[in-house]
Amino acid sequence: MLRHTVIAAALLALAWSSLPPLSAEDETTDGPAPPEVPTLPAPRLVGPRLDEARTKALQKGGGNAATERAVTAGLDWLARHVGEDGGWDADGFADQCAEGTACTGIGKGQHGEDMPCPFDDAITAVATLAFLGRGHLPGADDDPHGALVEAALERLRGAGGTWGLALATQCFAEAEALERKGRWQDDAESGARALLGRRQADGAWGYAAPYRPGSDIPFTALAVQALVTARDAGVELPADLAPGVEKFLATLEVKKGRLAYMKEGRRYGYTPTSSNAHCGAAIRHLLGVGLSTPAHRANMSLIAKQKPSWKISFRDVNVPGRGKVPVQIGNLSMYQWWYGTVATFQAGGTSWSGWYGKAKSALVGHQEKRGCATGSWDPKGTYERQTGGRVFATALGVLILEQPYRHRRIER
Ligand SMILES: [Zn+2]
């Protein structure tokens, strides 16, 4: 009996060994099934961030060894100040500083209030985008930042809040478009679905919806970036996305090239601003819509006049009910520059070369070169100084310099 069993087992083993190798699908393991590897479309926005293609795109887009050194140093600063949970703490990052030193520039409340910055999810996502922007792939063994990017993406799986959702979705979509292993596709898909579920009847997105009706420019800019990136991760976008958003944009007041925050914004105390003009131009370029409208042309000519320049001064302005309030003069806003960078890169030609030339000298010339702060940027612009602090400023500085390979020009 035993002999028969042994022979049968030997025959079975022989038959088994002559079978073709198991496919990944047939294999049974104790762990969770590996994610299905998706067939993704060729990327339309996520740029050539790896290897020689990156070097070529860098040169073509006006980058050079100095911009690349600045990107490396910026990422190094971010890596030295990441928290143990894999994310960045906008007001607590100095806990990670080298002994005996502490970097300044902590994040604050939404309008500069002295309180812990409530946007750590969003700021962690912006920092993660800075690493992905250079082609640092999550978990890559041969990449010094591989483990950091993996941990940051895991941390973002729990991201909440309005900005957090949109920016984390952009991170997952970029990670999937670059890695193409199916590990982040569900996250990109569910984030995109959640964003589409929050779209309003006017065609766009509102930060305060549903409590205040109507969409606004900053949240729409984040949602559009996330969705256009998600398309590169295989997410299908609704056909009415671009025309619907344009319908909303067309309702906004434009004054001297500046753009309103929302429809009838003055009713809520909002006057048209430069940063909304930069956001609006980026939205139109990413969606390829409204590019010949007078509003867009006015926004783009304002952007051409407000190229990056590292100058800052303040002027006291009388605000009813608040007395004299210092208002920043000049164009130093890395948040605004980020959108100007996205818009002018898509516009191409002298619009891009003129802009990036100024961005390079402003950023490379003002990156910190001493102590623990080496590689970071002082949070001097309104949104960086007031809210996001040094982590936000540094992530934005890196993203702006990476632009030649971070994106590709979207073909229509
Ligand atoms: Zn430090």
Image (spheres, rainbow, N blue to C red):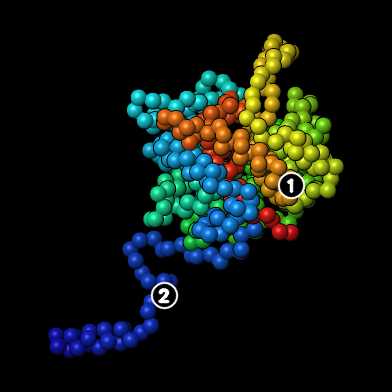
Query: In terms of sequence position, does the residue under pointer 1 or pointer 2 come before the other?
Result: 2
Residue 248 coordinates in the image, percent (x, y): 78, 42
| Relative image position of residue 378 (x, y in whole percent) | 53, 28
For disc 2, the neighbor class at 10 Å (few under 14, some 14 to 19, many from 20) is few
- In this view, 222 is above or below 31: above
Residue drawn at the location 38% of the way across and 55% of the way down: 141
Image quadrant holding the C terminus, namely bottom right
Identify which residue is drawn at 82% across, 32% down.
256
Q: Closer to the camera: disc 1 or disc 2?
A: 1
Judge by depth and name the residue closer to the eye, 178 or 406. Answer: 406
Q: Secondary structure at mark 1?
A: helix
Q: Is mark 2 within 8 Å of ligand 1?
A: no
Counting the numbered discs, the total is 2
Q: Which residue is mark 2?
A: 23
Q: Quadrant of residue 380?
A: top right
Kindly tell me whether residue 267 is visible in this rendering.
Answer: yes
Q: Position of residue 290 (x, y in %)?
A: 80, 48
Q: Is residue 87 visible?
A: no
Which one is nearer the viewer's eye here, 7 or 344? 344
Horizontal relation, residue 167 to residue 342: left or right: left
* Numbered mark located on residue 350 in the image: 1
Where residue 274 sits, quadrant-wise, is: top right
- Coordinates of residue 54 in the picture (x, y in percent): 55, 55
Residue at 52%, 49% in the rendered image: 134
Position of the N terminus by quadrant: bottom left
Residue type at numbered disc 1? Thr
Q: Secondary structure at mark 2?
A: loop
Q: Is residue 97 left or right of residue 160?
A: left
Residue 270, numbered circle: none
